[in-house]
Image: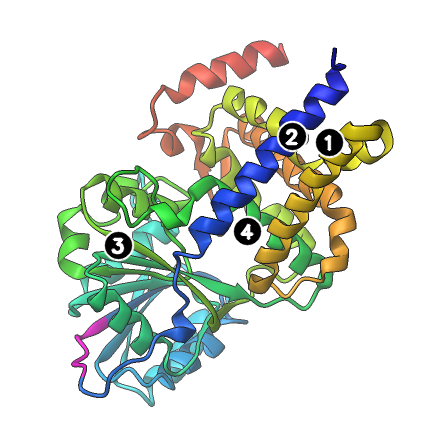
Amino acid sequence: MMTILQFLAVLSAVTLIVGLFVIFIGSRKIKNLRSIVVPEDFVFPKLSVVIAARNEENTIAASLQSLKNNNYPNIEIIVVNDRSEDNTLREIESFTNNSNRIKILNIQTLPEGWLGKIYALQKGAESASGEHILFTDADVIFNKDSLKKAVYFFNISGTDHLAAAPEAVSKSSRLSFLISIFAMYLVAAKQPWLVASKKYSASIGVGAFNLLKTSVYRKIGGHSKIRNYPDDDLKLGELVKKSGFNQQFIFADSEIFVEWYPGVAEMYRGLQKNFFAAFNYNPFILALTIIPQLLLTVFPFAGLFLLSDVFFLINFLGLLSLFLYFNSTRRFSNASAYYFVLFWAGCLFFMLIQVHATTKVLVEGGIHWRGTFYPLSILKKKHGFNAQSILRFWGKIRS
């Protein structure tokens, strides 16, 4: 009879091997933007690019320069200055002096019930006149032909929404390593190869690149239905799919670039606003996910020291599957394969963020994002159960 450790080794290995097979087959169905060839006679529809910027003085200039240099022939760029307290507005204005492509909107106050970035995107979209709207971030860099390729693929695929995964640029090898792990989490959770099929509920959105038909965006109510979600990019994709419209996902490494976070500390702080939201602000759901995370990401490494004979081999095959999966996501961050020996530590890092984010939100009663505090009562307004019940539960624990 198997011991508990041996059973866990078999369960972990089988799950990882099957998971790798599913992900490998699924990922082969996803196209890459760099392989798209645009015919010379294609007529490009007008494209409205909407950027929400708050305190982005260090990144907005490079992003706008890449858009200004872009070869897309029929484009308007709408930059929404979201209550910036630095020189963001001045940086934006320096581009409007030399380009009639760029329009500035200024937001001074935030309406009740809205998160700042989501409101900025909504206002930018309201002034858009293009047939398509691209929502992107103030730190995204575009190759000169990337928008042409994306819009062409958008039209020939017959989709209503296209999300593209950019290449993450990092000055830190440790950060590149962690970005690869995060990509593994995201791909496993969202299964982007399924989003194009209406047989599945799978959906996806990417903050760096969410391209929609303007008519579809208006029909789904814009960002008004997701006004209180910090993971607005994912929720926009979910809203499109639930509304019955078509969705596509494409890889965009070597075409679209983003420096996601300057360093590991910034990543730790930045992700805290998202992780608890991903679990619908329910600590019980979060607690239940920690167990399989440990089983699939930490246990295989421990098994190298705790198992022997055939179970050691089974565990090793699971670990090999995990490495092959990690290796496949390195393309998005150029992480070194040697970092895999620390994979278990990287996963514990993300689990720590999840637990810390949950505790922090419950203790403080909300999140701090882009210089504004948003109470949990607002964040949970559209979720399945009342925010006050979870606050009362936490209050009982603390007392």
Q: 310 or 101, which lies in front?
A: 310
The magenta stretch is: 42-47
Q: Are marks 2 and 4 in contact (CB under 8 Å)?
A: no
- Comparing labels 1 and 3, the label whose residue is closer to the camera: 1
Which quarter of the rendered picture does the N terminus lie within? top right
Structural distance between the alpha carbons of marks 2 and 4? 20 Å
Q: Secondary structure at mark 4?
A: helix
Q: Are marks 2 and 1 in contact (CB under 8 Å)?
A: yes
* Residue at numbered disc 1: 299
- Comparing labels 4 and 3, the label whose residue is closer to the camera: 4
Q: In the rendered structure, which disc, 2 or 3, sits on the residue that comes first in sequence? A: 2
Rate crowding at label 4 as few (under 14), some (14 to 19) or many (20 or more) other CA atoms within 10 Å.
Answer: some
Magenta span: predominant SS is loop
Q: Position of residue 141 (x, y in %)?
A: 46, 74
Q: In the rendered structure, which disc, 2 or 4, sits on the residue that comes first in sequence? A: 2
Q: Secondary structure at mark 3?
A: helix
Q: Position of residue 304 (x, y in %)?
A: 82, 35
* Residue at numbered disc 3: 122
- Comparing labels 2 and 3, the label whose residue is closer to the camera: 2
* Residue at numbered disc 4: 183
Structural distance between the alpha carbons of marks 2 and 1? 8 Å
Looking at the image, residue 220 sits to the left or right of residue 14; the answer is left
Q: Position of residue 261 (x, y in %)?
A: 59, 59
Q: In the rendered structure, which disc, 1 or 4, sits on the residue that comes first in sequence? A: 4
Residue at x-position 37% and y-position 76% = 146
Residue at x-position 68% and y-position 56% = 177
Q: Secondary structure at mark 2?
A: helix
Structural distance between the alpha carbons of marks 2 and 3? 44 Å
Rate crowding at label 3 as few (under 14), some (14 to 19) or many (20 or more) other CA atoms within 10 Å.
Answer: some
* Residue at numbered disc 2: 12
| Residue at the bottom extreme of this rendering | 98
Q: Is residue 6 above or below residue 150?
A: above
